[in-house]
Amino acid sequence: MSVPVRLGTLALAGAVMLALPAPLQSAEPARTPTPLTSKPKRAAVATCPAEKVDINTASRDELRTLPQIGSLRSKLIIRARPYAAPEDLVRRKVLKEAIYDKIKPCIVAPSATQATVQTK
């Protein structure tokens, strides 16, 4: 008995599909979607400040002038001071290597002893 039910269901489904109108076809070719707003992309190469930034003594605002360094990252840099070398930012996991590579030409980190002597 289950076989006639299946065949009846398939026959009914086929009849419903035949009763549907054909999809509308346009004479125009399909268009690719375009963005609603065209925002200019940011420059791929960020610029460094005029002078290199000392990561041991720079203020939060000075650190924020570096590419890819905002409020949070500048705070993290300050908390992890002092640095013996700029590479310490990556070694101590303060910054990811991709971010460090962008700011590497913009920063200096004199040895920690020199930084404490300069601030006194």
Image (cartoon, grey):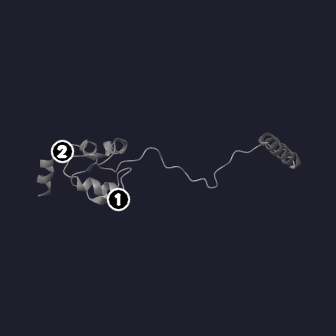
- Amino acid type of the residue that numbered disc 1 sits on in the rendered structure: Ser
| 19, 74: nearer the viewer | 19
- The image shows residue 33, relative to residue 70, as above or below, that is above
Q: Position of residue 108 (x, y in %)?
A: 25, 45
> Residue at 82% across / 41% down in the picture?
4
Apparent side of residue 93 relative to residue 22 in the rendered image (left or right): left
Q: Residue furthest front?
A: 1
| Residue that label 1 marks | 71
> Residue at 88% across / 49% down in the picture?
19
Apparent side of residue 110 relative to residue 18 in the rendered image (left or right): left
Q: Position of residue 39 (x, y in %)?
A: 57, 53
Quarter the N terminus occupies: top right
How far is mark 1 from mark 2, CA to CA? 23 Å
| 35, 119: nearer the viewer | 35
- Amino acid type of the residue that numbered disc 2 sits on in the rendered structure: Ala
Q: Position of residue 23 (x, y in %)?
A: 83, 47
| 110, 95: nearer the viewer | 95
Apparent side of residue 39 relative to residue 106 in the rendered image (left or right): right
Q: Residues within 10 Å of mark 1 (few under 14, many from 20)?
A: few
> Residue at 35% across / 59% down in the picture?
71
Q: Position of residue 32 (x, y in %)?
A: 70, 44
Q: Residues within 10 Å of mark 2 (few under 14, many from 20)?
A: some
| Residue that label 2 marks | 84
Q: Earlier in the sequence, mark 1 or mark 2?
A: 1
